[in-house]
Amino acid sequence: METRNPPARETSGIDLIRTQTHCLVSEDLELRHAIETMERRLSDIRGRLDRLRPSGKGAK
């Protein structure tokens, strides 16, 4: 017995815009989270480098 897909629902322009907007907002939040994570990592690395650098007289 063959199974058929139900007829596709027509998507209105406003539905399409809502879907695209939702996707863009989700991507934006993911990118913001990734950027914040990378900024924290970079800050940690800079802190470690600062601790490794010699300090005091004659240090460049």
Image (spheres, grey):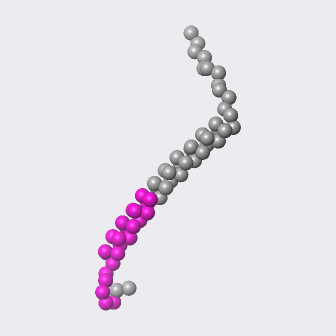
Identify the residue at image location x=56%, y=43%: 22
> From what the image shows, is residue 56 above or below residue 30?
below
Identity of the residue furthest to the top in this view:
1
Q: Quadrant of residue 46?
A: bottom left
Where in the figure is residue 31, as x and y percent of width and height? 50, 53
Residue 39 versus residue 45: which sits nearer the camera? 39
Identify the residue at image location x=52%, y=46%: 26
Where in the figure is residue 57, as x and y percent of width and height? 31, 90
Exactly how many numbered labels are in the figure?
0
Identify the residue at image location x=60%, y=40%: 19
Q: Is residue 45 magenta?
A: yes
Q: Is residue 18 magenta?
A: no
**Quadrant location, the C terminus:** bottom left
> From what the image shows, is residue 2 above or below residue 17?
above
Q: Is residue 21 left or right of residue 43?
A: right
Q: Quadrant of residue 47?
A: bottom left
Identity of the residue furthest to the bottom in this view:
57
> From what the image shows, is residue 54 above or below residue 19?
below
Q: Is residue 21 left or right of residue 46?
A: right
Identity of the residue furthest to the front in this view:
14
Looking at the rendering, the stretch of residues picked out in magenta corresponds to 36-58
**Quadrant location, the N terminus:** top right
Q: Is residue 13 left or right of residue 57?
A: right
Residue 10 versus residue 4: which sits nearer the camera? 10
Identify the residue at image location x=65%, y=26%: 9
Where in the figure is residue 36, as x and y percent of width and height? 44, 59
Q: Quadrant of residue 12?
A: top right
> From what the image shows, is residue 18 above or below residue 6?
below
In terms of secondary structure, what is the magenta stretch mainly? helix
Where in the figure is residue 29, as x and y percent of width and height? 50, 51
